[in-house]
Amino acid sequence: MSPQPPSSQQAAPNILFVLTDDQGPWALGRESPELVTPTLDRLAEEGTYLERFFCASPVCSPARASLLTGRMPSAHGVHDWLRPEGVGRPGPQGGYLEGIPTIAGELEQAGYRCAMAGKWHVGYSHEPAAGYDYWYTHRLGGGSYYHAPIWEFDADRGRTTAEPRETTEPRYFTDAIGDHALDFLRRHAAGDDDRPFFLQLATTAPHDPWTSGNHPDQLLDLYAQTDFPSVPAPEPHPWFRREAFPDVLEHRHRNLAGYAAAVTGVDRMLSRVLAELEEQDLLEDTIVLFTSDNGFSCGHHGIWGKGNGTFPLNFWENSIRVPFIAWGPGRIAAGHASDQLISATSLFETVLELAGVTAAPDRLRAGRSFAPLLTGDEGAEKTAASQIVVLDEYGDNRMIRTPRWKYVARRRGPEELYDLDADPQEQEDLSGDPAFAALREDLSERLRSSFARSSESELDGWQLAVSGHGQRRPLGGQDRQGAFEQ
């Protein structure tokens, strides 16, 4: 039986937000049985599972920025993954996301204590971002799982005048994130702090590298005897950028085992955090939200990668769709799954509504709260299907998706049009078929008008030559094209 929406007298919940990196919608045990994810499978079974949750951009940094702000990339200005030179110290252009409301910033002002452990990668990470008073971060955005580059702060892990130190993390990075989660929870309890908390755990897993030496043998051994029958292995797609993963076809099992081990490592870490919450008698007062920044293919559609795994950059389902699980006793509908289309830009308003916080006005915010869908409001899924659209963008490439249709527009490349009811694998591009010309024009106009409402002219990506090779700095200054690696 679905719970009733929380009453106004119900105390504000703690929120545990777990964000993985490059996890396709297929990469859970409930979707691909050979994957070992008992904790996540249980949360999905006991809570609410969203089957069609879409990122705002099929690459990490812009997708993460959209999750945290509710804006499309053309309204926050992060259009590609941030290169190492783009996340060091602020330059003359200023910072990323300056002046834009974020989840943590709004929650802190409403009385929450906010903590972050793991991968930031939506700007500079040498000091806590707005709203957070506990901060443990990767200096870059990815790399080896052992000896990961991190910022080390003094013992209070908070805002401080002391300079952070550049060092490396000797532990398996996913485990280190879990250790810091436990550290935060114990500090929070020891401080007799009665504020609710927002704890963001952001892994680099299951992003590559997947090779030997990056993951514990205990995790890799779980996959020694499977050939991953749930994961397709078609011929490489003509657009596949094989240079990014040159050995994946010859060493399919090794790379899949590394990817799967990384996913199981996240599951294992989350289990430890939930056990600590239970030990502190906080589990009943906590909402768990789990998702990924963008999707990923490990052979699906003939590629390994995400939106920049091909050229032209792609918006195939496994690049833009990600898992989403919500769990919380008495607050989140139990045993529920929904196939309603939801955009990741809606997370901002959803988290605030679950916390009982009114979002600050923002004319450029694209998403709308789907909290009623999570709390069991029977009217939440009655939105007319024809009115539901999801937008995606990656530089001068844009997509609009309805429950049935997907249309892709590119300034420097081909259009695409797919009937997802008849062709869920996106094998037959209908964009050149005269029979669908009127539909294509309608979707094109809906795409154009949607972005006209969701873009800021100086941050708009449509005229930017984004190639998938990374962003060097914020868009401030006259040389906007110079912000991107070609």
Image (cartoon, rainbow, N blue to C red):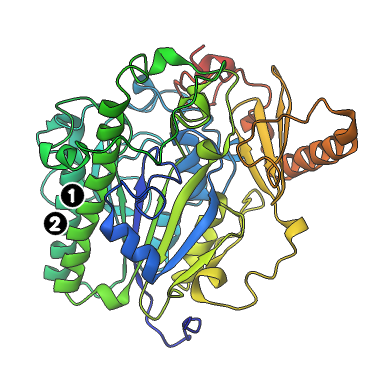
**Badge 2 element:** helix
Residue 53 against residue 189 in the figure, above or below: above
Residue 214 against residue 391 in the figure, above or below: above
**Badge 1 element:** loop
Mark 2 touches mark 1? (CB < 8 Å) = yes
Q: Looking at the rendering, which quadrant does residue 481 occupy?
A: top right
Name the residue: 71% across, 44% down: 422
Q: Is residue 315 left or right of residue 5?
A: right
Residue 176 place in picture, x, y as percent: 16, 44
- Residue 431 visible here: yes
Residue 486 place in picture, x, y as percent: 52, 11
The three-letter amino acid code for the residue at tag 2 is Asp
Name the residue: 17% across, 25% down: 212
Disc on the earlier residue, 2 or 1: 1
Return the residue at label 2.
183
Name the residue: 16% across, 46% down: 175
Q: Which mark is residue 324?
A: none
Front in this rendered view, residue 135 or 91: 135
Q: Residues within 10 Å of mark 2 (few under 14, many from 20)?
A: few
Real-space Cα distance between discs 2 and 1? 10 Å
Return the residue at label 1.
157
- Nearer mark to the viewer, of 2 and 1: 2
Residue 380 against residue 85 in the figure, above or below: below
Q: Looking at the rendering, which quadrant does residue 443 occupy?
A: top right
The three-letter amino acid code for the residue at tag 1 is Arg
Front in this rendered view, residue 37 or 95: 37
Residue 186 against residue 228 in the figure, above or below: below
Residue 467 place in picture, x, y as percent: 54, 18
Q: Looking at the rendering, which quadrant does residue 312 occupy?
A: top right
Q: Residues within 10 Å of mark 1 (few under 14, many from 20)?
A: some
Residue 454 place in picture, x, y as percent: 68, 44
